[in-house]
Amino acid sequence: MTSDEIKELLTKAYTDELETVMNYMTNAIVLDGVHAEEVKESLDVDVEEELEHARILGNRLKQLDESPPGSEAFEARQANLQPPEDTTDVQSVIDGVLEAEEDAIETYRSLIEAAEEANDPVTEDVAVTILADEEAHRTEFRGFRKEFPQE
Ligand SMILES: [Fe+2]
Ligand SMILES: [Fe+2]
């Protein structure tokens, strides 16, 4: 019914969501300037959604008789979402968010595939639901990027 691949992907997704919570929250706090307000508000809303994703994934792991990991197993991966030295550099945060959302979309697509293969419709449903949120986040930040065109 379930597979090691599913457990690995659920675990990866869980830690990715928590790293995203940390970096979105940090950037929502540190960004400055007139162009930053809308992005900061959006990041704050997304923090709540990404945290809920982590909770759903952790509970699914528990249902599969696995424990979600604690911080000692954690490896940071979001180099491009670190708070910018120039706190008015909203553009770099937007780019970092888009990269994180693309990465999440890829993970949930893989999870959907693995769940289909393993005939695990509950995990598949979890992944489809979260994927829809990540695609909405990507759309939102693509909109922000249009407002801040790269030269
Ligand atoms: Fe998420
Ligand atoms: Fe997201």
Image: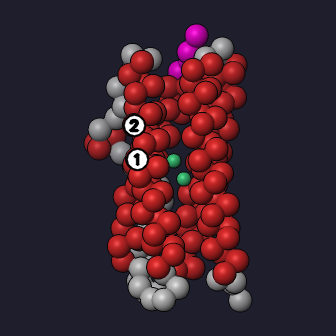
Left or right: residue 134 versus residue 55 is right
Q: Please provide the residue range marked out in magenta.
A: 1-5
Q: Are marks 2 and 1 in contact (CB under 8 Å)?
A: yes
Q: Is residue 43 magenta?
A: no
Residue 125 x %, y %? 61, 27
Q: Nearer the viewer, residue 151 or 54?
A: 54
Residue 29 x %, y %? 35, 73
Residue 101 x %, y %? 59, 55
Which residue type carries mark 1? Leu
The residue beneath circle 1 is: 51
- Estimate the spatial distance between the alpha carbons at disc 2 and disc 1, rounded to whole Å: 6 Å
Occupied quadrant, residue 91? bottom right
Q: How many marks?
A: 2
Residue 111 x %, y %? 62, 32
Dominant secondary structure, magenta: loop
- Quadrant where the N terminus is found in the figure: top right
The residue beneath circle 2 is: 55
